[in-house]
Image (cartoon, rainbow, N blue to C red):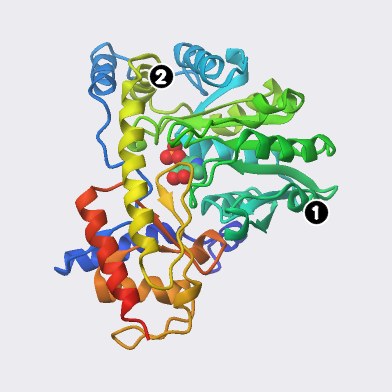
Amino acid sequence: MAFLSDTLARVKPSPTIAVTTKANALKAAGRDVIGLGAGEPDFDTPQNIKDAAKRAIDAGKTKYTAVDGIPELKAAICDKFRRENGLSYTPAQVSVGTGGKQILYNALMATCNPGDEVIIPAPYWVSYPDMVLLAGGTPVAVAAGIDTAFKLTPAQLEAAITPKTKWFIFNSPSNPTGAGYSRAELKALCDVLLRHPQVWIMSDDMYEHLVFDDFEFTTPAQVEPKLYDRTLTCNGVSKAYAMTGWRIGYAAGPVALIKAMATIQSQSTSNPCSVSQYAALEGLTGPQEFLTTNKAVFQRRRDLVVGMLNQAKGITCPTPEGAFYVYPDISGCIGKTSAAGTRITDDETFATALLEETGVAVVFGAAFGLSPNFRVSYATSDAALVEACTRIQRFCAALS
Ligand SMILES: Cc1ncc(COP(=O)(O)O)c(C=O)c1O
């Protein structure tokens, strides 16, 4: 359509949303569907956070605020970085936006020029490449497969960097794999980056609090202080505090970048929701027990899902360090035919047949840039997970 922009032609709608829409349509038609596609905790926002939001409304905190966040929240974010990550930032180095998504988008919009390359390890969160494209840059996906536990190696990073590389997007624990880089693995990547001063690091730490066993979360500016001046450390309250709908994300980095991001935000959305900012303030400064309880539930579900999926014929499911996703490999299912007669040629046909024949909705791996796999979000009840994994086992057993 001639009316639409060239920019729009560069991007595609989110495939994860497409899967959810299809699952909902089947549900509405009366089918028994179990959705394992959602990227959000199934818990409710903690009561103390909801109460803080109600108090903010009653106190009239319902007007425009400073474009990139109220001072109280910026101060709390500085405390959070000091307390949890050993990172020292001033409020002028902090930006608050409408979700982690807007923060990442602002940063790319504020920095990408045509020809600028952005390195994105694959599988990746679906929005990274499209946000780079919207910002006019060139996404450079580098496949990190099951053989390296879905983690980019220093040699791969080195090989992907060119004089045009502007950003390296780092996401640990990762959506969609749950893979988390150890301190040593991250340090090895940082050593590569030290040799390339033109490359900035966008660290997406959204799943920081969802790490299991004795995994230690670390972030680039902490592991290699020499990268502090070219790192944007991004985070948010969506996943940690079960606040996806409140839309608050934040980042800290060099003042000039933070100011540039505020300029983009001032001419697009202005401040993030005032009430949500007070809710996030309570999240970051109030009781933190929720994080531990949450984590224990997710760890139990991870073990359940990994155990059951590894019993499905043709599926190999690595055990991830964090987040609430697993990313099983389905090489053993490709080329086979389902009970209803669908030939499984790739992960998309697998996911479609699985949904149509068993009512289990998962997102196919091609959406995240690495195949043949699918993503399971285990942010749902244990009973639903057991039922879904049993159906997946049956589906795989019937492949011939
Ligand atoms: C890796 C990653 N980064 C950022 C986000 C965005 O989070 P928010 O809901 O705060 O915009 C998500 C949400 O799915 C995510 O998975």
Q: Is residue 40 visible?
A: yes
Rendered image: mark on residue 159: 1
Q: Is residue 77 left or right of residue 45?
A: right
Q: State the SS at label 1.
A: helix
For badge 2, the amino acid type reads Leu
Residue drawn where x is 41% and y is 86% of the image: 343
Residue 136 in the image: above or below residue 339: above
Picture quarter containing residue 94? top right
Rendered image: mark on residue 330: none
Indicate the position of residue 227 as horizontal and vertical percent values.
74, 28
Picture quarter containing residue 28? bottom left
Residue to which mark 2 is pinned: 284
Q: Nearer the viewer, residue 240 or 166?
A: 240
Indicate the position of residue 394 as horizontal and vertical percent values.
27, 73
Indicate the position of residue 215 as horizontal and vertical percent values.
51, 34
Q: Nearer the viewer, residue 243 or 312?
A: 312
**Looking at the image, which residue sits at the far bottom?**
341
**Is ligand 1 closer than 8 angstroms to the Cβ of mark 2?**
no
Residue drawn where x is 36% and y is 27% of the image: 291
Q: Mark 2 or 1, which is nearer the eye?
A: 1
